[in-house]
Image (cartoon, helix red, strand yellow):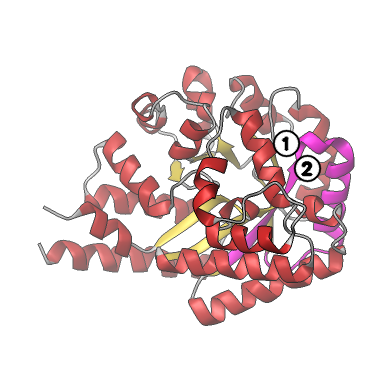
Amino acid sequence: MVDMAAFVAGLPKAELHVHHVGSASPRIVAELAARHSDTTVPSDAAALADYFTFRDFAHFIDVYLSVVDLIRDAEDVRLLTYEIARDMARQNIRYAELTITPFSSTRRGIPDVAFMEAIEDARVRAERELGVVLRWCFDIPGESGLEAAAETARMACELRPEGLVSFGLGGPEIGVPRPQFKPYFDRARAAGLRSVPHAGETTGPETIWDAINLLGAERIGHGTSAATDPRLLDYLANHGITLEVCPTSNIATRAVTTLDEHPIRAMMEAGVTVTVNSDDPPMFGTDLLNEYLIAARLLDLDAPGVAALAKNAVTASFADDATKARLADEIDTYTKAALSEQ
């Protein structure tokens, strides 16, 4: 029998749904909180565990934004981004599409050009020093409305950093209908960016339909409620639209009651391509290794099954063909070696 924890730890992985500020480790959050004495965020790393216990999704958003407020200059951005890559390297994450919400930082006074330079500096250094390939998804914070949408689209299209590959929409879904964001997704898609909005996390499948029909979604962030609509599951499967599933996140934000009730199995059994992701890992007390172990249990996967799940993320990524081929080969080589040792 393969030791699954050891297998997952060594498995080369890609991650497609993980947030920039939401990936700040307790050490970095505490350091930033200590630098910014006017914050409500604890500067004691141990106290952050209680601070990151969420009553519901709305409370999660409030806590998340309090951490966003700690990122106040370009050096904060550069430090955070590189440290995220360092944490990824420890997990054998070779490639990640990091969801970044530039509007949240530029509205707090960080110049847009300085912000772009900071994330790009960190990206180049992370690939050179850590072997982690980072790409960006610029994300509209839905709670900030159309001003945020217009500004995010402007930065994505006019200041487009080299690592930018996609355009997203996050924040609360309830009270933030998807159709209003269509013009901004149209602009981003016309500029060659791929569409990856969040949808169906805390609302019903109609939000996912809107993301597909109006925003041109190629992947869906979460898509939890898709399992309640057989026609939607069939559409996702037939059109190759991937769901970026984040099991622990769904429990932490109360989108799903318990892990055993998570719809990931129904998604997979319907033929939908599923990837496993950590979303906001330190905030949810998880990492990608833990999410793979959860998925393995929920889906009754052996080591080759987990490797196939890892390859889903490679296939569904927006990496170039050479990077995809290299990552897929790394997964196959590692899996063959791990199995031959048994």
Instruction: Describe residue 60's horizontal placement relative to residue 242 as left or right.
Output: right
| Residue 29 x %, y % | 61, 58
Which residue is found at the position 48% from the left and 64% from the top?
Answer: 88
Q: Residues within 10 Å of mark 1 (few under 14, many from 20)?
A: many
Q: Residue furthest bottom?
A: 128
Image height of 39 relative to 251, above or below: below
Which residue is found at the position 27% from the left and 47% from the top?
Answer: 305
Instruction: Give amino acid for label 2.
Output: Phe
- Asked if residue 162 lies in the magenta stretch, the reply is yes
Are discs 1 and 2 less than 8 Å apart at CB? yes
Instruction: Describe residue 24's horizontal placement relative to residue 170 as left or right.
Output: left
Image height of 77 relative to 101, above or below: below
Which residue is found at the position 87% from the left and 53% from the top?
Answer: 154
| Residue 208 x %, y % | 62, 28
Quadrant the C terminus occupies: bottom left
Boundaries of the magenta span: 134-163
Instruction: Give amino acid for label 1.
Output: Leu
| Residue 161 x %, y % | 75, 67
Instruction: Describe residue 253's horizontal placement relative to residue 340 as left or right.
Output: right
Label for residue 185? Answer: 2
Quadrant in which residue 330 is drawn = bottom left
- Assign a secondary structure to mark 2: helix
Label for residue 215? Answer: 1
